[in-house]
Amino acid sequence: MSDETASKNILIVDDEEIIVDILMRRFERMGFSVHAALDRITAIDILENQQIDVIMCDVLLPNGTDGEAVLHAALAQHPESHFVAMSGNIMSDESVQKLLQQGVDLFIKKPFLSLGEVADQVAELVSHSE
Amino acid sequence: MIMDDLHFKEKKGAHPIPVHTVEDHEEPLGELRRFEDENNELRKELELGEERIKLLKKELKQANKLATLGTMGAGVAHELNNPLTVISAEADEILDSIVAGRLSAEQTVVSVKNIKQCAERMRCLIDYIRQYIRRDEDTSWSKIDINVIVENALLILKPQMLSQGIELKLNLSKPLPQIWGHKTKLGSIFQNLLSNAKDSFDDLTDTRNRQIKIETTFVATKEIIITLSDNGCGISENIKEKIFDPFFSTKQADKGTGLGLAMTIENIKEHRGTLYCDSKENVGSKFTISLPLERRGPNRKH
Ligand SMILES: Nc1ncnc2c1ncn2[C@@H]1O[C@H](COP(=O)(O)OP(=O)(O)O)[C@@H](O)[C@H]1O
Ligand SMILES: [Mg+2]
C-alpha cells in the first residue's frame, strides 16, 4: 500500500498461531511481504535464509531464552533490521530496559491497546530506515 | 490435742462415720479422685491437641494453595493475556474493516470464531483457578478422568516449561477408566509435582536436553499409575528422607515453601493411593503415583 512498507520483509514470531494469523493479515494488507514462525528454530532458519527488514517477536517469559535467541540471530544476520519485542507477561521496567539495551527497537505489550496503532508504529519504524 | 479434736468431732455428731475410719480411707479415695481428675485433664488436652492438629493441617493446605497460586501468578497473566490479545485484535480488525468499507462476511466469520475460541480458553482457565482456590469442602468427590486432571494442570505449567526450554513428553493412555476422587486435591498433586519438576532445572548450568515426562497407564481392573519424571538436578541421598516434611525446602524463600510434597502425600493418602520417589542426584527424579480404581469414599483415616 504505502511506498515505505511496500516490498519490505517482516518476520512474525509467536507461539500463538492466531496471533501470528492476525498480524499476518494486517501486515499483508499494508503491503509487507510476511514470513511467520511459531518457534525459535523456524525463526532462526528464516533469518538465515531470507532478507528480513523487521522482526516482531514474542519474547515470552522474562527469563525465557526464545526471544533472546531470535534477537541474537537477527542482530547477527541482519544488523540493519528492526526488532520489535512483544510480551504478554508482567515485565518489570528493568527487564524492558534491558531488552532495549540489547538492541530491541520497540517493546509492545500484549494485549495490544490497538492493532492499528501497533501496525502504524511498526510501519513508522521501517520508514525511518530509508 | 488429738483427744480434744476427737472429742469435738464426735460431739458435733455430724459424721456418722467415726473419725479414724475417715482418716484411714481418705488417702486412697483422694488419690483415685486426683487420678481421675488428671485423666480427664489429659483427655481434654489430647482432644485439644487433636483439634489443633486438624486446624494446622487445614492451614497447611491453605498456605500451600496460596503459595502455589503466587507462583502461578505470572503464568496466569501470560495465559490470559494471549487470548485477550486475540480478542482485542480481532475486534480491531472488524472495526477497521467497517471503517475502511471492506468488511467481508468470510473474514468476519474467521475473526468472530477466533474471538469465541479465545473467550472459551479464558473461561476454562478461570474455571480452573476458581476451583483451585475454592475451599476443599465445596468440591465433592466424583468420578474423574486422571488425564483431564493432568491436562488441566498443564494449562498453566506447560507454557512456562516451554518458555524455559523444557521439553514436555506426554504419554497419556486413553481412554482411562475414571477413578473416584476429589478434583481440586488431585489437581494440586500434579500442580505440585510438576512445579517441582520444572524447578529442578533452575540451577543447572549444563546444556542437557531438559525433559519432563508424564505417563498415565491403567493396570487392569486395579489401579492407575502415573509417573512424572524429569532429568533435572535430582535429590541427594542426605535429604531424601526429609523432602516430604512440611516446610522442608532447598529453594529460595520466594520459590519454595516446603509444603508441596507434604500436601501431595496427604492428598494421595486420601485417595488411598501411594507415592514413590526415585531420584539420583544430577540425573533426575521420578515420582510414581498409584491410585486405586475401586469406588470407595475418601480415606479419612491416615
Ligand atoms: N523433581 C524434583 N527434583 C529435585 N528436587 C526435588 C524434586 N521434587 C522435590 N524436590 C526437593 O524436595 C524439596 C521439597 O519439595 P516441596 O515439598 O514441593 O517444597 P518446595 O518445592 O516448596 O521446596 C524441594 O525443595 C527439593 O529440594
Ligand atoms: Mg514444590
Image (spheres, coloured by chain):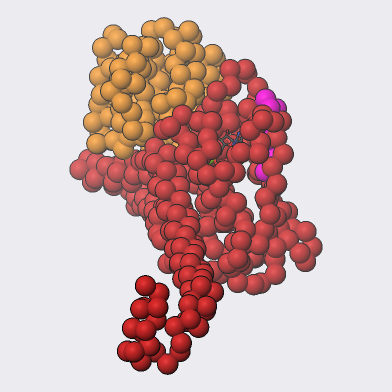
Chain colours: A orange, B red
Q: Quadrant of the C terminus of chain B?
A: bottom right
Q: Residue at the spot x=58%, y=28% of the render?
A: B201
Which picture quadrant has residue B228?
Answer: top right
| Residue A123 visible to the viewer | no
Q: Position of residue A58 (x, y in %)?
A: 41, 28
Q: Is residue B175 left or right of residue B246?
A: right
| Count of marks, rendered view | 0
Q: Quadrant of the N terminus of chain B?
A: bottom left
Q: Position of residue B136 (x, y in %)?
A: 45, 62
Does A105 sit above or below residue A114? Answer: above
Q: Nearer the viewer, residue B173 or B194?
A: B194
Q: Residue at the spot x=58%, y=67% of the render?
A: B300
Does A59 sit above or below residue B256? Answer: above
Q: Position of residue B6 (x, y in %)?
A: 39, 81
Magenta residues, as a range? B281-287
Q: Residue at the spot x=44%, y=25% of the render?
A: A63
